[in-house]
Structures are given as structure tokens and as C-alpha cells.
Amino acid sequence: MASLNDSFLIARSGILTHQERMAVISHNIANINTPGYHRQRALLGTNPPNEPNLFTSRNYAIGTGVRVMDIVRTYDETMERQYLNLNSSMEAQSSLSNALGGVEGLLNSTVDGVSLTDCLSKFWAAWQDVATNPSNIAMRNVLLERSATLTGAIESVATNLDDYGEQVINGTGPYTGAIATVVGDINDLATKIQNLNNRITLAEAQKVNANDLLDQRNTCIRDLSAKAGITIDVDQTIMINGQILVSGDGVTRNGLTIAATPPPQFTLAGNPVTISGGELDGYVQIADIVSTFRTQLDTFSIELMSQVNALHTAGYDLAGNAGVDFFTGTGAGDIQINAALYNAANPLLNSPELVAASSSLNPGPPLGPNVGDGSNALKIADLASVSMLALGNRKLGSFLTDMTAAVGARKAAAAALATDDQTALDAYANAMQATDGVVLDDELLDMMSAQRAFEASSRVATTINAMLDTIINRMG
């Protein structure tokens, strides 16, 4: 038969078990606002029964009380993987949208309050005015000034795009821009995760609770997913594009590196990897977009110089001399008005008479300048309405407008995707909070349950103590 001592030990197990259960509940409540914390709960089970043996007169087993079998961490792995994927997608689209806003601002930037598109329109209008009054020196000076404003605006946008590109990625290598910063962040997070994996592996091997370490690792993995798209194997090995970044046991960690020359190319463990998702993906895309628009601006500038120079050199100035190149330069970065026509330091030293506005000479006799002929200036002004093969059969003005519109459309699309992903991300976060997070009402109910069980076990122990006291005193 069971003794009072057996009953006392059972009561003791209840006291200790529900005391430990209360500690778990207290830990949950203390961490209710801790980012990445997952609710823990004490998993209870019966102690091994006291089986009958040669030294007992009973033929049945007697229970020995309760114990904490494990402290389990509530964690929905499927929802967490979905959250990581959405987090990577949202961060990619968000960083892309924000960066495109910067590019859009550069293309819409103004010189003295006038945008590049407006500068081009005023440039054509100035040629039209010269065509109407070819001998008017003031009109010719206005043309030169508006031309200089146009070239200044083109150079300004080109410089701004180059500077922006340098902020995203140093175009000549080694990389020092935002892309390199994110790669550094990824490698730092990988180091933290490796250290946590080592500690988790050691704790689990020693049968030590590693729930808090698992939460810390989970927070680092979420931060990592915001930097780049990742996949996680069943053994918690983290990979980028199929290549191992950190092994689940913490033994292996490979550093993400960038190739020495543009465009940005990445390697992991010596193998090339493609980044899809995360902030890094957004920056890779924006680096390509900036490079594309910079090339298009060069294409625009080269076509503008080529078309205007071809007509200008075919005309005649006020002295009857053949026209010189109106523009000089090789692209958007160095386009300028020919120094023979325009003096950037001192407008009083301009040579407006060299503007080749005429298409013909006065037949004379004697052969000489045709100062009243503005037909060549009109031809140049009419370039505004000419579709050019090098620009995809678009006009110069339309080409500029399309560039800006393309950035705006891409920005809007990225912003919409980021918003959609954020909405889904919030929904997943709320769902996971409901199942994995700490809910104060639930903890209070569990606390009351643990308190009642603790009080009941204490009452049993007190009662047994009184019974023992009675027995001892009577026997005495």
C-alpha cells in the first residue's frame, strides 16, 4: 500500500512542477514586447509509476506525481517560411521604389527652375525665332544662351545619374556603395547565425533548453531575409540561390562576395549566385536602371549633336562662311556649345554672327552672305518634329518624356507591389502573433490555473504533514 511519504512526494512534485510552470508563464509575460519572441509553455507529464516488487504487498502500480517533460516553443514553420518570402519580396520592391523616386527626381531636376524637357523646348523655340529674324543679333544671343542652358541641364542630369550610381554601386570597382554595404550586412548576419547555430547545437546535445537562442536565430534570419532572398533546408541550413551561406550545425559559413568589375555579380563558396529578393535585389535592379538611363541620355545627346551639327555645318553664317559644329563633346557628360560660338566665362565675347542660319548665299554679284535667309535655322527648329531611328523612331522631346515616364511607371509598379506585400506581411504577422506570440489574456488564465494547482498541491502537503504529526504524537 502507498505510504503517507509517497503521498507527500506526489504533492511535492505538484508544487515543484507548477512552480516551474509559473516561471515559464512569467518568462512569457516579461517578453511580451520582445521582438521575435515565441511563446513557451511547460509540457506536463506523469512521473514513472512505482511498480509492485518483491518488497511490496500490492499487485498494482502507484502513481508518483507530475513533472515538466519539456518546455516547448510555439512555432509554425510553414507560416514563418511564407513570412520570410514575403519579407524578401517587400524589401526588394520597397528599396526599388524608393531608389526609383530618386532617379525620377534626377530626370525631373531643373536648372534655374527649368527642367531638361523645358530646356529642349526653349532651344527649338530659339531656333524658330532666329529663322524668323535671321539678322537679329539679340535673337542669336538668346539662342546661344538657351543652348548653353540645355547643355548645362544635360550635363547636370548626367552628373547626377553618375553620382547616384556611385551611391548605389561604385561603377569602377572595388564596390563601395549601398550594394557593398548590404553585402557586408549579409555577411555580418551570417556570422551571428553561425554563432547561434553552434550554441544551439551544443545546448541541444546537452539537453539544455535552447528556446531563447532559437528566437534570437529566428530574428536574425528575418533580418537576413530583408537583405536577400533565402531558402532554409530542413536542417536549418540557409542558402542563397542553392548555395550554402550558413549550415544548420554552424560548421560551415561562406562569405558573399562581389566580382571586381561591374555589372554587380555575386559569388558564394566560389560559385556564382543570382540575388532574388531583399534589399540587395532592389539595389541590383536600380544599378541596372541607372546604367540604362545614363546610356539613353548619351544616346539622346549624341543624336542631338549629330543632327544639329549636320545641318549647321551645311549652312552659312552672317559673313557667308560655312557653319562650324554647333555642339562639341562625345556624350551627355561633356556636351557643350562650340567655344567658337559661345564663351561660357563672358557672354560679351560670344560670336552670334557665326550661327549658320542661312541655307544659301546671295548670288550677287558679288557672291556673298544672304543675311535675310533663315531657312537653315528653320530646318534645325524642325528637328523637334523628326522621328529618329537611333531613338527608336521617336522624336528627341518624346525620347526624354518617355524616359521620365518609364521611371514613374516602374516606380508606381514597385510601390504597388511593396504595398501588397506589406499588407500580406502584416496579415501573416498578426496570424503568427495569435498562435506563436504572447497573448496576455491567455497567460493570465494559465497563471491562475498554475496558481490553483500549486495551492492544491501545497494543501495536500500541509494535510499530509498534519496527518504525520497526528500519527507521531499518538504513537508517542
Image (spheres, grey):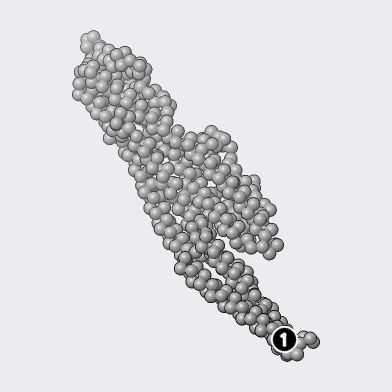
Give the quarter of the image for residue 373.
Answer: top left
- Please say if 43 is above or below 350: below
- The image shows residue 366 at horizontal and vertical percentages of 23, 9
Residue at the (29%, 31%) spot, across then down: 113
Residue 118 in view (yes/no):
yes
Residue for badge 1? 475
Front residue (pair 26, 139):
26
Q: Quadrant of the C terminus?
A: bottom right
Q: Is residue 115 above or below residue 258?
A: above
Residue drawn at point x = 52 percent, y = 60 percent = 30
Q: Is residue 142 above or below residue 104?
A: above
Task: Give residue 221's position: percent from left, percent from top.
Answer: 56, 54
- Quarter of the rendering occupied by the N terminus: bottom right
Which residue is found at the position 40% from the left and 43% from the top? 100
x, y percentage for residue 47? 67, 77
Element type at mark 1? helix
As rendered, which of 348 and 220 lies closer to the eye? Answer: 220
The residue sitting at the front extreme is: 476
**Extreme residue toward the right, this view:** 54
| Residue 470 at x, y percent in the picture | 66, 84
> How many discs mark residues in the rendered view?
1
Q: Is residue 392 visible?
A: no
Residue type for callout 1? Met
Crowd band around label 1 with a 10 angstrom C-alpha radius: few (<14), some (14–19), many (20+) = few
